[in-house]
């Protein structure tokens, strides 16, 4: 059998490595092909560190060829452009055609720009490339601010506005606030003029965690000097300006859009069943509805949860779904019934600068330095897991 896995993120890489291990244990010769547009695996959950770090950091990426070197997984670098489920084929952007007996879709999510001008006038943070671009952009703005004598221009150059108060927005705001001292020292920009604004349409930050977490996050961000604006809806975006409901304008040289995600466009375009935001719909076996040969996991999928409606889109869930899929595929190959995917209550942790975090790992509310330590341990464990298998 030939199994093609699209996307080498948390879900896809784990599915590939675990399946390879199972196949080798059973001395089977089935082929596993892992496809990604990048030559590296990205630790998306540390991208805010990449943005806000003075030293050039590559700690957010791992070379896929090295990670796969001990396995029999075949890596194909390419961008999936189209799926042809009837013919069991994947067509890559360069024209390459891959056929499959089973397909696993783990392509992650894309940024959804819900208001006019957002796509053209903001930066986003979903990939390592985005993080490096944002890092360089900020250095350029602060350097320009150090050179100008116009106070209004300086204020604008040193203002960063982040739209969206979820994981990405909160973590980025906290990290940028902590980086500002170093950045000003290195570029000569005046620290008192630096302003970081976090705008959220709803009345909670980190709404998945509930009211207590939002209050903790607001307090921690306020302490770092981040201005949080709740119940603030951005209506459109122009170059260097956010137009907010009620007619207010926020001018900033750095605008970051972290306010929405959607499933990859190619899923809808290929005729797969998707929800209103383009996430592919699966059953509780992670099998794409009406497509018995196709599975999906991670941020690109909408997976039913019998207790919570749908499974949260985080790295921890994605990784475990990848592992689950490896087991399910092995069961299929051996003619056994696959197991239902049962999402454990993993909870989550969000950093708010280097010295504070908040979250509910395994459902237990945790704040402050213990939460930082736990978040760091989880990250270290994941890095260990990656390098241990390569
Ligand atoms: C800034 C930020 C911070 C976060 N922090 C946390 C956190 O602290 N904890 C947590 O649990 N979660 C966090 N998350 C969420 C977490 O990163 C995602 O839930 C996780 O990355 C989802 O894993 P995935 O495997 O579904 O997708 P991804 O990890 O995004 O992987 C998708 C892969 O598919 C590839 N790909 C995409 N399209 C194509 C294509 N057309 N062809 C070929 N390859 C393609 C990409 O290159 C990528 O390698 C954070 C997210 C962001 C953006």
Image: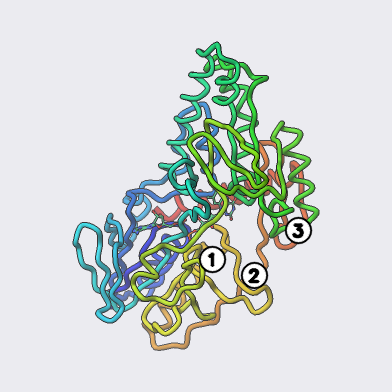
Vertical order, 153 against 116 (above or below): above
Give the quarter of the figure containing the N terminus. Answer: bottom left
- Is label 3 or label 1 in front? 3
Q: How is the image coloured?
A: rainbow
In front: mark 2 or mark 3? 3
Q: Which mark is residue 210?
A: 3
Residue 212 image position (x, y, % from top left): 80, 53
Residue 326 lies in quadrant:
bottom left
Give the numbered dot on residue 344.
Answer: 2
Is 187 situated above or below 41?
above
Q: Residue 250's spot in the image, x, y percent?
A: 61, 35
Q: Are marks 2 and 3 in contact (CB under 8 Å)?
A: no
Can I make out residue 61 in this image? yes
| For marks 3 and 1 on the same chain, the one whose residue lies earlier in the sequence | 3
* Mark 2–mark 1 distance (CA, rounded to whole Å): 9 Å
| Left or right of 274, for residue 92 | left
């Amino acid at each position: 059998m030939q199994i093609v896995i699209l996307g080498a993120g948390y879900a896809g890489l784990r599915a590939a490595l675990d399946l390879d291990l199972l196949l080798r244990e059973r001395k089977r010769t089935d082929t596993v092909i892992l496809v990604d547009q990048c030559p590296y695996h990205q630790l998306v959950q540390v991208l805010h560190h990449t943005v806000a770090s003075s030293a050039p950091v590559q700690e957010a990426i791992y070379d896929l060829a090295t990670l796969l070197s001990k396995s029999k997984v075949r890596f194909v670098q390419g961008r999936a452009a189209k799926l042809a489920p009837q013919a069991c084929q994947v067509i890559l952007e360069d024209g390459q055609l891959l056929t499959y007996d089973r397909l696993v879709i783990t392509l992650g999510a894309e940024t959804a720009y819900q208001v006019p001008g957002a796509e053209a006038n903001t930066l986003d943070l979903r990939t390592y490339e985005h993080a490096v671009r944002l890092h360089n952009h900020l250095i350029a703005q602060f350097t320009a601010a150090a050179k100008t004598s116009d106070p209004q221009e300086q204020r604008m150059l040193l203002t960063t506005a982040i739209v969206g108060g979820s994981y990405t927005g909160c973590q980025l705001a906290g990290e940028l606030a902590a980086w500002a001292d170093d950045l000003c020292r290195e570029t000569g920009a005046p620290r008192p003029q630096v302003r970081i604004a976090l705008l959220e349409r709803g009345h909670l930050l980190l709404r998945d965690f509930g009211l207590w977490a939002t209050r903790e996050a607001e307090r921690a961000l306020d302490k770092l000097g981040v201005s949080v604006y709740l119940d603030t809806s951005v209506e459109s975006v122009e170059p260097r300006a956010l137009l907010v409901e009620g007619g207010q304008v926020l001018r900033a040289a750095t605008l970051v859009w972290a306010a929405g995600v959607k499933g990859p466009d190619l899923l809808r375009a290929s005729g797969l069943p998707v929800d209103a935001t383009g996430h592919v719909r699966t059953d509780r076996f992670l099998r794409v509805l009406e497509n018995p040969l196709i599975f999906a996991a991670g941020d690109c999928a909408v997976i039913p949860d019998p207790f919570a409606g749908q499974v949260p889109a985080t790295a921890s869930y994605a990784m475990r779904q990848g592992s689950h899929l490896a087991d399910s595929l092995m069961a299929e190959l051996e003619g056994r019934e696959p197991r239902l995917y049962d999402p454990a209550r993993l909870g989550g942790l969000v950093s708010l600068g280097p010295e504070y975090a908040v979250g509910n790992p395994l459902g237990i509310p945790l704040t402050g330095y213990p939460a930082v330590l736990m978040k760091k341990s989880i990250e270290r464990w994941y890095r260990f897991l990656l390098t241990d298998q390569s």
